[in-house]
Amino acid sequence: MNIQLPFIVILALAAWLIVRHLRLRWWAVAALILLGFYLADTSAAPLIDNTTRDGVSVVNKTNK
């Protein structure tokens, strides 16, 4: 049985769990989100994108 969820739903759930269980403050979460947006405009963005895609493909291959 395959379940398909948008990646943003998984990230939102992970963020909620982190805030709830690790007592992380919302302003810290907002700062990290802004950091992600700023990183997307830097020269590191392609490296981050390729690394994320490679990691997801490795996880998908190991689950089959």
Image: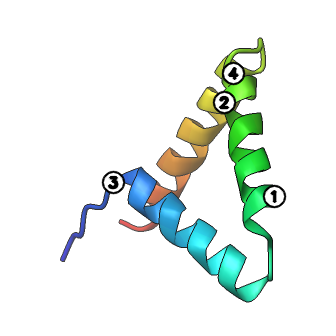
- Provide the secondary structure element on which disc 4 rests: helix
Q: CA distance from mark 1 to mark 4?
A: 22 Å
* Place of residue 12 in the rendered image (x, y in percent of width and height, measured from the top left): 50, 63
Name the foreground residue: 42 vs 29.
Answer: 29
Asked which quadrant contains residue 17, the reply is bottom right
Residue ID at (69%, 75%): 18
Q: Residues within 10 Å of mark 1 (few under 14, many from 20)?
A: few
Would you name the residue on which mark 3 appears?
6
Would you name the residue on which mark 4 appears?
45
Type of the residue with mark 4: Ala
Q: Earlier in the sequence, mark 2 or mark 3?
A: 3
Residue ID at (80%, 73%): 24
* Place of residue 64 in the rendered image (x, y in percent of width and height, measured from the top left): 35, 65
Q: Residues within 10 Å of mark 2 (few under 14, many from 20)?
A: few
- Provide the secondary structure element on which disc 3 rests: loop
Q: Earlier in the sequence, mark 1 or mark 4?
A: 1
- Provide the secondary structure element on which disc 2 rests: helix
C-beta proximity under 8 Å, tags 4 and 2: no
Q: Residues within 10 Å of mark 3 (few under 14, many from 20)?
A: few
Would you name the residue on which mark 2 appears?
37
Q: Which colour style is shown? A: rainbow
- Image vertical order of residue 45 relative to residue 64, above or below: above
Type of the residue with mark 1: Ala
